[in-house]
Amino acid sequence: MSLLSLRNVSARLGSRTVLTDIDLTVEAGELVALCGPNGAGKTSVLRSALGLLPVSAGEVSLGEDPVAELGPRQRAERAAYLPQERHIAWNMPAIEIAALGAPFLSAADGLVRARAALDQVQAGDLADRGVADMSGGERARVLLARALVAEAPLLLADEPVAGLDPAAQMLVMDRLRSCTAKGRGVLVSLHDLTLAARHADRIVVLNAGRVIADAPPVQALSPLVLRTVFGIAGEWLPAADGPVLSMRPYCE
């Protein structure tokens, strides 16, 4: 049984079609990367998966049930969400922000789990600091901790490495990868193709709201896809620990 399933899904934002005939699944223990140029539909897929963007055709299921038939608590128990927006309205301590990821636990248990999650993302020393007093990278780690606290079987993350330095990017991707080792499924949108190639079991390439490729990285990011979707030239080079993606500007 898939943790997430989109079947022939189409969706609109106002008069504009943003998704067309999307088929996508995420299984337990699997990290799937959504890649595509700006405006390809990555965020729309994530929002549709959570029922935040109503679909105009097709069906979205979390587990065995259509997401449209699930209440807010049922959705929260099945899927954690790390949105692209990192704005936090109140200057609350990091540990309290992280604890919001487990609203169904007692306050004491939520704080215990929040502290453990902050430690996982190397932010334990930030536990008592207000989030408004943090850098963007520190705040990103706190929000990742909030998503980890939920311990839902599925985690959806929208551009979680955007604006982070290389070390922080690797930390975020390593933590997402560790979720799959515990049997969780992860669907993450990424612009960085090298990170996607290194960490994903499958890459779903989107363009203009349609799925162009859905395969392991070497097949999904083929030279043809790199050229026609991303406008770059690329090839996979052999290496001791597996093929490495090499990219350069495309010139006709």
Image (spheres, rainbow, N blue to C red):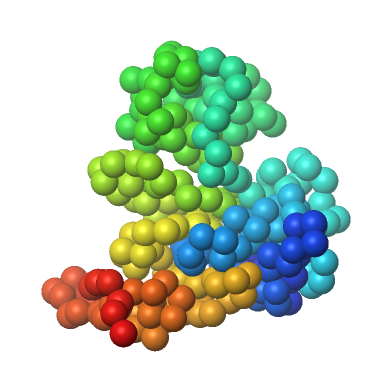
* Residue 100 on image: x %, y %: 61, 28
Nearer to us in this view, 17 or 57: 17
Residue 89 lies left or right of residue 224; in this view the side is: right
- Which residue is depicted at the point 60% across and 45% down? 80
Q: In the picture, residue 193 is in which quadrant?
A: bottom left
Q: Is residue 137 above or below residue 13?
A: above
- The percent coordinates of residue 139 (x first, y second) are 44, 29
Residue 97 placement (x, y as % from top left): 55, 24
Q: Position of residue 28 (x, y in %)?
A: 54, 63
Query: Where 153 sits versus 252, above or below?
Result: above
Work out which quarter of the rendered image holds the C terminus and state it: bottom left
Tell me the quadrant of the picture where the N terminus can be found: bottom right
**Can you see residue 251?**
yes
Who's the residue at 57% across and 43% down the image?
A: 83
* Residue extending farthest left: 240
- The quadrant where residue 202 appears: bottom left
Q: Is residue 132 above or below residue 153?
A: above
Name the residue rendered at 56%, 26% in the picture. 88
Task: Tell me which corner region of the image, top left, top right, bottom left or bottom right, holds residue 233.
Answer: bottom left
Left or right position of 114 against 24:
left
Residue 108 in sight here: no
Residue in front for this viewpoint, 226 or 126: 226
Query: In the rendered picture of this protein, how many numbered marks are placed on residues?
Result: 0
Relative to residue 207, is residue 4 depicted above or below? above
For image coordinates 32% across by 32% down, the residue present is: 122
| Of the pair 57 and 29, the residue shown nearer to us | 57
Q: Residue extending furthest right?
A: 69
